[in-house]
Image (cartoon, rainbow, N blue to C red):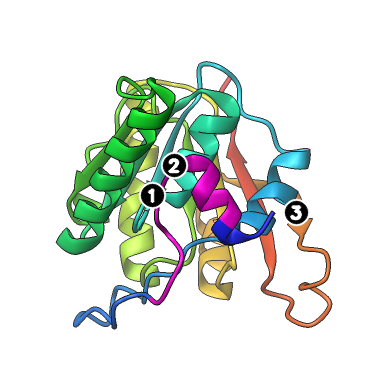
Amino acid sequence: MTNQQYDQLLNIKTVGNQKGFHKSLHYHRYEPTPYQGLEQLFQSYELRSGDRVVDFGCGKGRLNFYIYHLFNVDVVGIEMDEIFYQDAMENRGDYIKKYKNGSEKIHFQCCMAQDYEIKPNDNRFYFFNPFSLQVFIQVVNRILLSVEIMEREVDLILYYPSEDYIYFLENQTAFEMIQEVKLKGKYEHNSNERFLIYRLRHW
């Protein structure tokens, strides 16, 4: 299906031009992950019923609705832009209106990524290169601190991963890459068109 067809299926609006750039150099321009990329990711990476997915820089919430619709798991979208946050909340209302469910599991929060308080049941974290390495480090450190308090298996899912993110994770943290998903038809022309999944195991 096309992006437009997926939006129609989910009764949301995430297609179209995005609004400008953020004034801070630490935050990158918002772009939604292509639905076709999500299709390929979740052909080989599955979420379990108890998982809770946090999307940093969620924009209008495309990933959140897609994941909830597919896996019926808790999803949390973190968005610092108030306009995008309002768009996500409108999409939430439209999705719930059509499917009569999701109100208990689809959540959005308007705040800076590094200010989000990691919950004990947050265990899957999604990043589409949303901000600078400095912010990423702060967010990962908060995740690690949360795991010290409540031990659990944690995955970081990176789309279009920056070399800085990869270097930091592989050289300064206990995260290990467990999976790479190269997007067919795109990776051949752009090696950034891939997902990398890093896992922190605690026994």
Q: Which residue is pictured at 61% across the width and 39% down the height?
A: 199
Residue type at mark 2? Answer: Asn
Mark 3 vs 1, N-terminal side: 1
Q: Which residue is pictured at 44% across the width and 21% down the height?
A: 151
Asked if marks 1 and 2 touch (Cβ < 8 Å), the reply is: yes
> How far apart are the two marked residues, 1 and 2, measured between alpha carbons?
5 Å
161 is higher (above) or lower (below) than 1: below
Q: How far from the left and from the top, in percent, is residue 195?
A: 66, 57
Tag nearer the camera, 3 or 1:
1
The residue segment tinted magenta is: 5-17
Quadrant in which the N terminus appears = bottom right
The residue that mark 3 highlights is: 180
Nearer the observer, 74 or 192: 74
Nearer the observer, 8 or 189: 8
Residue type at mark 1? Answer: Gly
The residue that mark 1 highlights is: 61
> How far apart are the two marked residues, 3 and 1, measured between alpha carbons?
24 Å
62 is higher (above) or lower (below) than 10: below
> How far apart are the two marked residues, 3 and 2, measured between alpha carbons?
21 Å
Magenta stretch encompasses residue 6: yes
The residue that mark 2 highlights is: 64
Magenta stretch encompasses residue 13: yes
| Residue 34 circle label | none
Q: Which residue is pictured at 67% across the width and 74% down the height?
A: 192
Asked if marks 3 and 1 touch (Cβ < 8 Å), the reply is: no
